[in-house]
Image (cartoon, rainbow, N blue to C red):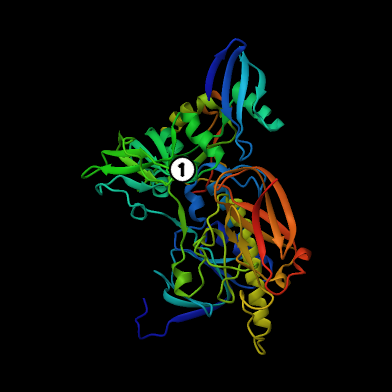
Amino acid sequence: MTDRATSTGIMRELTCIRCPRGCRLVARLSGTEVASVGGNACPRGDAYARKELTNPTRVVTSTVRVAGRTPAPMLPVKTAQDVPKDLVRDVMEALASVRVSPPVRMGQVVLADVCGTGVDVVATASYP
Amino acid sequence: MASSSEPMVSRSVDVLVVGGGSAGLAAAISARKRGARSVLILERDGRLGGILNQCVHNGFGLHTFNEELTGPEYAARYVERARELKVEYLLNTTVLSLSADREVVAVNARDGVFRVAAGSIVLAMGCRERPRGALDIPGTRPAGVYTAGTAQRLVNVDGFLPGREVVILGSGDIGLIMARRLTLEGAHVSCVCEIMPYSGGLKRNIVQCLEDFGIPLLLSHTVVNVEGAERVQAVTIAQVDEDLRPIAGTERRVPCDTLLLSVGLLPENELAQQAGIDINPTTHGARVNESLETSAPGIFACGNVLHVHDLVDYVSEESAHAGSCAARFALRAAIEKDAPSAPTAPMSGEGSFPVECARGVRCAVPSFVRPSAVEDALTLRFRVDAVYRDVCVSVYVGGRRVSHRRHVALVPAEMLTVRIRASYLEGLSGDDVITIALEEG
């Protein structure tokens, strides 16, 4: 994402990922609002740019350690829903100290309400 | 283990599947659904699921389940289905040899060396990463050079961070995924070098794994030297010209302790070659017909051992087809046991027509089509050889164009699929071919 200041406001460039074409989108921002989107070949590009520029979110996937096993195996986990993009690193930090005790069922909550997002981190595999 | 003088234990099954990853699971499930009475998977790892187990990121299954699953979740759905359908499997079991008459020799610690005779066999061994040795990178041979998939296993399964300062060579999807993963685990990824002028990975991964973290993607760049005695200390990167040769004067030294390679995948076909199965030099997988049957009658291939896919959903779909055809073959063989009909050649001969790649198209699967064996529709899968904009993908059957579809953009990183209705294949005769080509709008 790159910015350009113009007389009509900030122009922000980004790449649409809705299809392989990968349109270079140019959005004009006025304050925190998206005033217009250009460069998109279809309506999905417009929607993508507005979401990315006003409320970008990501599902965070990672691993946590299983307690009391040597060598310590890793248990894969994910946020059950997407979380604000700027909290991704905080979520990773919160997961660094998590230890789960076996057995673990896929879908089991390993960390509730991560970083105050209201979103739980759940196991994405079972561990006997 | 049995001593060599004892007779080897042997057993027989309707359908034997070599490999319990995404391809093997889908093939086994489909074979059972199609009526195979006994289906056995031989898997060399300690669990089913294959490479999906280490792909902890999400984005799998959009096509199949209409939701974004992580690798282990996607695998779990197939493992559960396989168990429900009473698919048998042996873990920690390595297949030692495969013969063209549908018999394998395998080994594990519990049963020793044993033989399995099968009505039909599905090859689903997946692929391997191209290692450093395949690249001719000059320099020393220190620790710290990993393939991206090895690094992925170290981080996601074993819980080790392979390095702190990372350069990635190759923009394949696993490399892009690992750029994000290592960054989030506290390493610094200074750049991804791609020798081609376009990325080998999916756009979504470039944006979400590189751009999100400010990691530069250097197109038309490669690594020309590796430094370090014990451990990697730096690599030298350089720009390349149109012939992919490094341009003198563009070299730049990048200090790092780790070099990850994400430079392509190759189908793992030692077993197929041992059995004398024909290999397609472009895909590096077996040559197959419309039923995904190889040059050895009753031996089928699917998933990444057939040709490298970018989406697991397509692996599952293709493998279900292979499993279904394998069951059909095994059941027919069982019925005709007492009065076998002459085995039909899977490929050549009358009633079989080659698939040819024309302008802009490479790596098409299948290689041959027997119209009489196509049930509803023929599925053609292929890649383009470069980046194209506003072109049409056309398929000709004999001289007749039966499919013509416009695309705003085509990239080599994305496999394409075209389905041709069986009725369009009826008129094929003589020396006719099926041709896939890119054409102007």
For image coordinates 42% across by 34% down, the residue present is B183
- Which residue is label 1 attached to? B171
Answer above or below: position of B74 versus A55: below
For image coordinates 53% across by 80% down, the residue present is B101
Q: What's the residue type where badge 1 is placed?
A: Ser
| Residue B212 x, y percent position in the rendering | 50, 30
Left or right placement of residue B188 versus residue B75 in this view:
left
For image coordinates 55% across by 78% down, the residue present is B12
- Which quadrant, please, contains the C terminus of chain B? top right
Task: Identify the subunit bearing mark 1.
Answer: B
Answer above or below: position of B136 versus A6: below
| Residue B11 x, y percent position in the rendering | 52, 79
Q: Quarter of the image holding residue B422?
A: bottom right
Left or right placement of residue B404 versus residue B56 in this view:
right
- Which quadrant, please, contains the N terminus of chain B? bottom left
Left or right placement of residue B83 versus residue B137 in this view:
right
